[in-house]
Image (cartoon, rainbow, N blue to C red):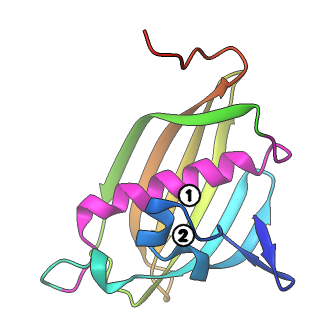
Amino acid sequence: MIQADNKPIFMRPGHCAGDLLEAPAWTVIEESPGLVVIDAHIPDQVLNPRQQLFGGFTGTYVDMMAIYTLRTLYPYREDFWITTINMRIDYLEPVLGPRMIMRGELINQGRSTSLISVTFLDEQGTKLVYSLVTLKRVDRRVTDTSPV
């Protein structure tokens, strides 16, 4: 996680998905290798007409949490990417906000793939969303990104 004024923040501005979800304003509650717990508000632009988190944006939150959870296992480096290869989301209750707690936790780590769980909770601790994400770590040095 990035430090700003001695306060850990989830990410700096400039990431399109993070900016949409207003991630720079999230608060890191807990961080350790393989675990990230975040207090996040739900911005108006991701609400449906019922004033609930629109289900289509849930995957964006899940993806960001899973990737950053896996990144806690490695020192900051530019020599690899993390890509999502599978995501399952169970919607247990509507996400009403205005805040939610998100918990990302490493379930299993292999050589190149890892399984991460991401859970959304309301302020009373009720589980709202449960997801499992399979991520793959890709070495940038051997990835050919040149046009064919």
Specify few, some or many for label 1: CA neighbours under 10 Å numbering under 14, 14-19, or 20 or more: many
**Front in this rendered view, residue 138 or 95:** 138
The residue that label 2 is drawn on is: 102
> What distance separates the C-alpha of mark 1 from that of mark 2?
8 Å
Please provide percent x and percent y for residue 81: 64, 34
**The residue stretch that appears in magenta:** 51-77
Q: Is residue 97 magenta?
A: no
The image shows residue 32, relative to residue 97, as above or below, that is: above
Tag 1 secondary structure: helix
Looking at the picture, which amino acid does disc 1 mark? Met
Quarter of the image where one finds residue 88 = top left
**Magenta segment, prevailing SS (helix, strand or loop):** helix
The residue that label 1 is drawn on is: 65
Q: Is residue 54 magenta?
A: yes
Q: Residue furthest front?
A: 147
Disc 1, disc 2: CB below 8 Å?
yes
